[in-house]
């Protein structure tokens, strides 16, 4: 089954404790992205990747890191999480701008 | 820069029609439409491409005015299952092909 898998689905952590949210797709897609969703603000892009070792900042990259060492994986790293990073996070992948994007199930992160 | 969606919210009775608009300040080569149920991942509805090509569900219709950088999603004879938040995502010239920028969403509620 074609899918994008995020882990964990829910996470509560404390300020400053490094964490990683994993994202994996099994469709051999070149493009992968991370978005955060907050009430009233829609889906805001954090980072995106066009292929292995090729990444670029989205609209809200501050406080986040990504890496793309393998085509299927695109982890999101929060080196020192803060409460303003409490949000619902989505990973997405696609073959390109002319094809649909597939979204993961989402990760609800709470930083206290 | 996020595309602008209007209206922000709309309430319908079953069987009524609605139009959701999406406008960008940048030249577009593609517009994507997704629907999200509360707490779930966005689900693909349609892609509209420069030149008139469309890909998507048979019961959903949309338009793409390339010159005005606008798209509209048409929901006819609405059903209860149409309820959710609708997002447009735009692919811009000058950006990475697979980089989708989403609007803030339009919340649609269909009442019996």
Image (tube, coloured by chain):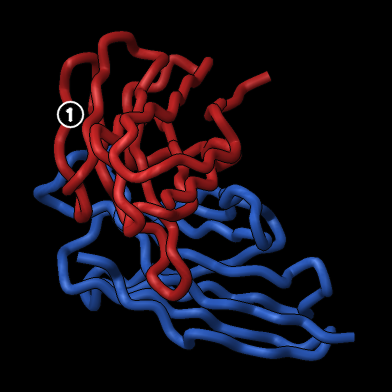
Chain colours: A red, B blue
Identify whether A1 is placed above or below A40: above
Q: Is residue B80 left or right of residue B11?
A: right
User: Residue A50 in the image: x percent, y percent?
Assistant: 23, 27
Q: Is residue A71 at least partly visible in the picture?
A: yes
Identify whether B53 is placed above or below A51: below
Q: Is residue A26 left or right of residue A40?
A: right
Task: Identify the residue at horizontal 18%, vertical 40% (top origin).
Answer: B96
Q: Is residue B51 at least partly visible in the picture?
A: no
Residue occupying the far top of the picture: A70
Q: Would you name the residue on which mark 1 appears?
A: A55
User: Foreground residue, A54 or A10?
Assistant: A10
Label 1 marks a residue whose chain is A
User: Residue B69 in the image: x percent, y percent?
Assistant: 25, 72
Task: Identify the residue at horizontal 48%, vertical 20% (top origin).
Answer: A24
Of helix, strand and loop, which one carries label 1? strand
Task: Identify the residue at horizontal 43%, vertical 64% (top origin).
Answer: A38
User: Residue A97 in the image: x percent, y percent?
Assistant: 33, 41
User: Residue A28 in the image: x percent, y percent?
Assistant: 44, 15
């Amino acid at each position: 089954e074609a899918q994008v898998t995020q882990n964990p689905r829910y996470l509560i952590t404390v300020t400053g404790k490094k964490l990683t949210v994993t994202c994996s797709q099994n469709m051999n897609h070149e493009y992968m992205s991370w978005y955060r969703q907050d009430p009233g603000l829609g889906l805001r892009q954090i980072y995106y990747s066009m292929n292995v070792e090729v990444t670029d900042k989205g609209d809200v990259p501050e406080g986040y890191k990504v890496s793309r060492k393998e085509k299927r994986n695109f982890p999101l790293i929060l080196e020192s999480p803060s409460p303003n990073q409490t949000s619902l996070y989505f990973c997405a992948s696609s073959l390109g701008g002319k094809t649909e994007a597939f979204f993961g199930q989402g990760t609800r992160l709470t930083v206290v | 820069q996020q595309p602008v969606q209007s209206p922000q919210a709309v309430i319908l009775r079953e069987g009524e029609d609605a139009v959701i608009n999406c406008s960008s300040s940048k030249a577009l080569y593609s517009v994507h439409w997704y629907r999200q149920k509360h707490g779930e991942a966005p689900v693909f509805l349609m892609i509209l491409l420069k030149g008139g090509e469309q890909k998507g569900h048979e019961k959903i219709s949309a338009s793409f005015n390339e010159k005005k950088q606008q798209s509209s999603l048409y929901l006819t004879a609405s059903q209860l299952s149409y309820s959710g938040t609708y997002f447009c995502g735009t692919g811009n010239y000058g950006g990475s092909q697979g980089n989708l920028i989403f609007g803030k969403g339009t919340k649609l509620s269909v009442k019996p």
